[in-house]
Image: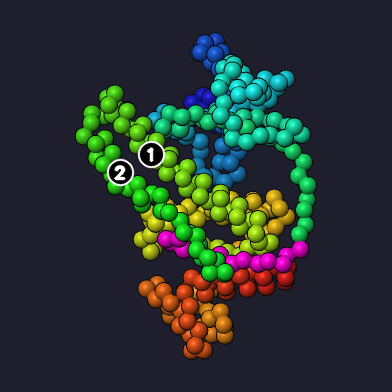
Amino acid sequence: MLAAKKKHYEETGTMRRVTPAQYKAEYPYLKEVDSLALANEQLHLEAAYRNFFRDPSVGPPQFKSKKTDRRSYTTNLVNGNIRIEGKHLILPKLGRIRLKQHRNIPEEYHLKSCTVSQRPSGSYYVSLLYEYEAVAVTREVSRVLGLDFSMTELYVTSEGEHGVYPRYYRSSQEKLRRMQRSLSRMERGSQNYQKQRRKIARLHEHIANQRNDFQHKRARQIANDWDLVGIESLNMAGMKQALHFGKSASDNGWGAFVEKLTYKLAEQGKELVKIGGWYPSGKLCSKCGRKKEVLPLSERIYHCECGNEMDRDYNAAVNIREEARRIYLAA
């Protein structure tokens, strides 16, 4: 469809509308696929062109790579063609598939669509999209927490607690290095090469699952215990480049943790307050309010003229908590 649109535009200067149905005679294998999956690809292509016409800087749609593209498709519920029966999932054209279900789904939820994807490790996942009526909950803010980002521990709270992130990528780095070195010695495209590539992909997936599990549990604990949480808005991409913290900043996944914490708080009628990146949380004394003009990263203990001596990250977390409280009350 993209090729037809590009060719028609080059010849006429106009945009041609194409549908998957018109290709089924020439390519019979398209009849073996769920028609709604093809229709969703058409919608994605149309959306890509709309984005390009609205903002040309994003660039026109490009052809997908057969090797590096995400292997997935989306289909929609029509007349009960997608349903869960016991330990099986019923999908159009595929029939009954053995399912390991992540959680029980309430009966009042309405299934809308599903996305089937294959990871580089070879494992398959299905994401089910449900619609339900959310009940708005309002809570009185009595407990406020400040979180300061920590490169090695994920965060330090205004209560002096540490995230104690296990640094899963760093702990598996030596094993990953050996596996990648072994892969580099193999003939590209051979059976042994493909086997080793899947082993490396499974290790990466395992590390990602460990990180994801840790973030979910920590975010749930914070969301259950606190009514208002304050954090700093950090430019993680800039931090990785400017301060050369690439692996360390990527290992703990601060951005993904913040996303999880945000929606877990919102589900309970609670709120996450983001403080501007220019707020000098680390340079302010949490006791007297004095501000240090210079505070090198190597100085891990905050010393103030008023006699206050405390961990640098703990001091910043206390300041973030008070600023979040001020912003919430002023809103």
Q: Is residue 238 visible?
A: no
- Taking the spot 64% from the left edge, 51% from the top edge, the residue there is 264
145 inside magenta stretch: yes
In the rendered image, residue 321, in percent from the top left (x then y), is placed at 61, 70
Considering the image in quadrants, where does the C terminus appear?
bottom right
Label 2 to label 1, Cα distance in Å?
9 Å
On residue 203, which mark appears?
1
Position of 99 compared to 302: left or right? right
- Taking the spot 64% from the left edge, 23% from the top edge, the residue there is 86
Name the one closer to the observer, 72 or 231.
231
Under circle 2, the secondary element is: helix
Position of 234 compared to 66: left or right? right
Name the one closer to the observer, 228 or 56.
228
Say above or below: 284 vs 104.
below
Hey, which quadrant is residue 228 in on the image? bottom right
On residue 175, which mark appears?
2
Task: State the extent of the magenta-drawn residues as a range.
Answer: 140-153
- Taking the spot 42% from the left edge, 44% from the top edge, the residue there is 207
In the rendered image, residue 304, in percent from the top left (x then y), is placed at 48, 85
Q: Find out whether the residues at labels 2 and 1 contact each other: C-beta distance under 8 Å.
A: yes
